[in-house]
Image: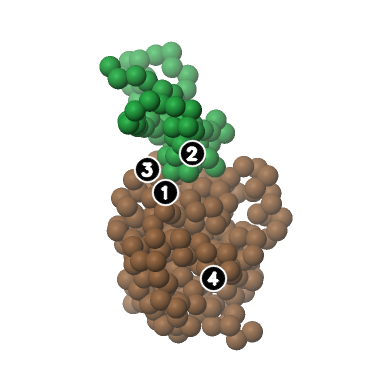
Amino acid sequence: MKVGVVTFPGSLDDVDALRAVGIGGNEAVPLWHGDHDLRGVDAVILPGGFSYGDYLRCGAISRFSPVMAEVIEAAGRGMPVLGICNGFQILCESHLLPGALIRNDHRKFVCRDQRLRIENTRTPWTASYDEGAEVTIVLKNGEGGFVADEATLDRLEGEGQVVARYLEVNPNGSMRDIAGITNERGNVVGLMPHPEHAVEDLTGAGTDGLGFFTSLLETAQK
Amino acid sequence: MPKPEILDPQGKAVLGALPRLGFGGVTDVRQGKRFELEVAGEVTPEVLAEVEKMAETLLSNPVIENYTVRVEQDA
């Protein structure tokens, strides 16, 4: 499958994401924030970083970039979209996902190998995992606190839209330890930790993140 | 402004700094943003409605923030 990775001005992890797409067995396609063009891809990843310098609010400017108009439309048609860290923030600002991400409750940037539980394996980004799988994936953020009103949180939990939850430590004050969520349809996933940094033994905390990049093919073969 | 139920870590940091500088009596601090927009011509109800729309779509995130729009004349 062809998987596009969008580069915004200020994206940091676009190259790692492109590399992870390839390692996961898919064809990586670089996309540019200023283009009204998804180049025929089957899925899109919005990578981590500080797009538009995090000006105004994280993701607030990126949400109105030309490529996002295409991404929002494609997501509405059911195209798989994964937002990692800053990408998650962009998806919330786009209202493709509910809630918002605010400054960490302890006010410091956090960078750690984070234990997570994968709670929803029905999305095209998590099908490679066993439900309830406990994994270690790198986390690094300054504004990663997931917030939403109580009714939204109850709905997310009730409908099984919590994709991943923090284990052992809540690293950023996220409500109900939420690390990642999906939309009602299940094609759009936002995740604060960085699976693209956990796909090779040579670097990082292991290869537990690889599942996010192999799931597309597994889903397509089902 | 961040909605009352939303944690405001920056406001908390300011609240913590005030007593260290000898300022007492402050029980809470909330930190928000202020945008000054200059518009050409009169601020008609139509212009004001347009600014409200800007506040809702871009300047604020209604999921976590409240906003108010106020007209001020040139000094």
**What is the spatial separation of the Cα atoms under label 2 and label 1, in whole angstroms?**
15 Å
Mark 4 or mark 1, which is nearer the start of the sequence? 1
* Residue denoted by label 2: B53
**What is the spatial separation of the Cα atoms under label 4 and label 3, in whole angstroms?**
27 Å
Q: Do the residues labelled 1 and 4 touch (CB within 8 Å)?
A: no
- Residue found at the very far top of the displayed protein: B25
Residue A84 position, x and y percent, is: 45, 62
Residue at 40% across, 70% down: A37
- Work out whether disc 1 and disc 4 sit on a shared chain: yes
Residue at 39% across, 60% down: A66
* Residue denoted by label 1: A60
Amino acid type, residue under disc 4 in the picture: Pro
Amino acid type, residue under disc 1 in the picture: Ala
Residue A89 position, x and y percent, is: 46, 53
* Residue denoted by label 4: A80
Determine the image quadrant of residue A147: top right
**What is the spatial separation of the Cα atoms under label 1 and label 3, in whole angstroms?**
7 Å
Amino acid type, residue under disc 3 in the picture: Leu
Q: Do the residues labelled 2 and 1 touch (CB within 8 Å)?
A: no
Determine the image quadrant of residue A138: bottom left
For chain A, give the colour: brown
